[in-house]
Image: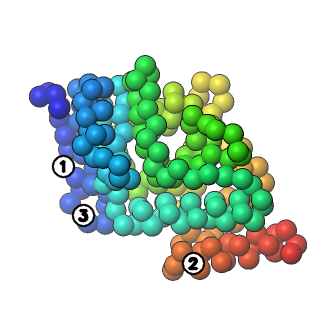
Amino acid sequence: MSSQARYRQPDPEPTHDGIIHFSGVSWDDYERLLVMRGDHSAPRIAYLEGEVEIMSPSQTHEGIKSVIGRLVETYCLERDIVFSTYGSWTLKDKARNRGAEPDECYVFGTEAAERPHLAIEVVWTHGRIDKLEIYRQLGVAEVWYWRKGVIQPYCLRGERYEPVNESQVLPGLDLALLMRFIEEPTTSQAIRGYRDALRVEEGR
């Protein structure tokens, strides 16, 4: 790691994510961090033009992202949408000098894809790197940001993300309905409740 790297100590509050920030980091240093971390989903590492953010997600963060992911999968199964889940897939591009790892990500359909169609980010503890700027150059079609109980989808249109009211990669998905089940006491209750609501919506 560069001797000029600066960092911020993680938030001491145990319910928050632990975040460390480095600046003046070369691409080779970033690659070394990925090797040191190994084949694990945490900590998650983001890189943007010499800035690195290492995030150790809290239990709350992991719980929220997992429930959102399970509800997305429930929707796809109920609506016969073919999908593959890739968790915290390490997305990077040396030429564009950036890399990121979403909380959850998905590819829809059967065709192989170099990038996920949907990335999900839970903002539980604010970091310093703009991950939308990373995903923009990496070509991720849609990103969902969960903040304070609300999911805001962003759709990549041309060279920038635009906030939208409805998912473009999962047309027909009612985000307000999905969000009603995120705070259920257990994941199984969330899945069953959302599944039943989807069936009522469809008239089954």
**Residue at screen point 78% across, 61% down:** 79
CB-based contact (under 8 Å), mark 1 and mark 2 = no
**Residue at screen point 27% across, 55% down:** 18
> Which quarter of the rendering shows the C terminus?
bottom right
**As drawn, which residue projects farthest toward the top?**
95
Q: Find residue 175 and report its horizontal and vertical position in percent.
A: 67, 58
Q: Dot 2: what SS?
A: helix
> Which quarter of the rendering shows the N terminus?
top left
Neighbour tally class for label 1: few under 14, some 14-19, many 20 plus, Cα within 10 Å: few
In the image, residue 176 sits, relative to residue 192, either above or below, namely above
**Residue at screen point 57% across, 78% down:** 188
**Could you tell me the amino acid type at mark 1?**
Gln
Task: Using the image as rendered, state which of residue 144 and residue 109 is in the foreground.
Answer: 109
Q: Find residue 156 and report its horizontal and vertical position in percent.
A: 63, 33
User: Residue 24 is drawn in which quadrant?
Assistant: top left
**Residue at screen point 75% across, 65% down:** 78
**Could you tell me the amino acid type at mark 3?**
Glu
Residue with the mark numbered 3: 13
Label 1 vs label 2, nearer the camera: 2
Neighbour tally class for label 3: few under 14, some 14-19, many 20 plus, Cα within 10 Å: few
Confirm whether residue 115 shows in the render.
yes
The residues bearing labels 3 and 2 have C-alpha atoms spaced at a distance of 29 Å
Task: Using the image as rendered, state which of residue 129 and residue 187 is in the foreground.
Answer: 187
Confirm whether residue 130 shows in the render.
no
**Could you tell me the amino acid type at mark 2?**
Ser
Residue with the mark numbered 1: 9
Q: Which mark is residue 25?
A: none
Neighbour tally class for label 2: few under 14, some 14-19, many 20 plus, Cα within 10 Å: few
Q: Which mark is residue 188?
A: 2
In the image, residue 158 sits, relative to residue 195, either above or below, namely above
The residues bearing labels 1 and 3 have C-alpha atoms spaced at a distance of 11 Å
